[in-house]
Structure formats: structure tokens, C-alpha cells
């Protein structure tokens, strides 16, 4: 089960931190141990660290309208999204 880091910018850091949407969209995909991070020098730059049981399922989900809606809800700026997978 690889550990994945996804980092991106958000419109409102406090809203992003308090949002339940990460658990709602990633939980059913078998993603566990989701942890959130913020850049102390640029709080609108954030990251999640998570354990992913099925990378193919997560990457397919990233292309869905459900995930796009979750990103809009959370104020994620999708053009800034970078996904790193543990080697």
C-alpha cells in the first residue's frame, strides 16, 4: 500500500482544513490515514498524506465529476495539484 502526498493551493485554508469531503470521497476508495499539512510561510499551499490501497481506483476517481465537485467545495485550485507516490 503506497503512501501518497498530494499538494496544491487552496482559496481558504481554514475551510479546506475543516472540510469533511476528503474522507467522504477517499474513504470509500480504501484510502486511510489521511493527514493534512499547511505551509507555514504560505498557508494557502497545503498537502495531504495518505495510504492508498488501490492507486488505479484513486487515479480513476480523480477524473470523475464527484471528485471535481469535492475539489470545488474545498476550494482546491486544480491547476496546482501535484501527486507524489512513494517509490
Image (spheres, rainbow, N blue to C red):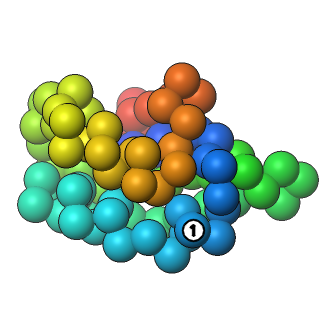
Q: Residue at x 12, y 53 (%)?
A: 29
Badge 1: how crowded within 10 Å, few (<14), some, or many (20+)? Answer: few
- Compared across the picture, whether 81 is left or right of 61 comes to right
Q: Quadrant of residue 83?
A: top left
Q: Where is the C terminus found, in terms of image quarters?
A: top left
Helix, strand or loop for disc 1: helix
Q: Nearer the viewer, residue 3 or 76?
A: 76
- Compared across the picture, whether 42 is left or right of 27 comes to right
Report which residue position mark 1 lands on.
Answer: 15
- Compared across the picture, whether 41 is left or right of 57 comes to right
- Compared across the picture, whether 79 is left or right of 56 comes to right
Q: Residue at x 49, y 31 (%)?
A: 78
Determine if residue 58 is in view. no
Q: Residue at x 70, y 47 (%)?
A: 45
Q: Residue at x 51, y 75 (%)?
A: 18
Q: Quadrant of residue 39?
A: bottom right
Vertical position of residue 10 compared to residue 34: above or below: above
Q: In this figure, what is the number of numbered marks?
A: 1
Determine if residue 72 is in view. yes
Outermost residue, right direction? 41
Residue 86, how many percent across, how many down?
41, 37
Q: Nearer the viewer, residue 76 or 51?
A: 76
Residue 32, how many percent across, how many down?
26, 65
Residue 69, how many percent across, how many down?
30, 45
Amino acid at each position: 500500500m503506497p503512501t501518497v502526498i498530494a499538494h496544491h493551493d487552496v482559496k481558504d485554508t481554514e475551510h479546506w482544513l475543516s472540510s469533511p469531503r476528503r474522507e467522504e470521497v477517499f474513504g470509500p476508495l480504501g484510502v486511510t490515514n489521511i493527514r493534512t499539512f499547511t505551509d507555514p510561510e504560505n498557508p494557502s499551499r497545503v498537502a495531504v498524506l495518505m495510504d492508498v490501497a488501490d492507486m488505479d481506483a484513486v487515479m480513476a476517481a480523480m477524473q470523475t465529476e464527484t471528485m471535481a465537485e469535492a475539489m470545488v467545495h474545498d476550494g482546491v485550485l486544480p491547476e496546482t495539484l501535484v501527486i507524489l507516490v512513494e517509490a
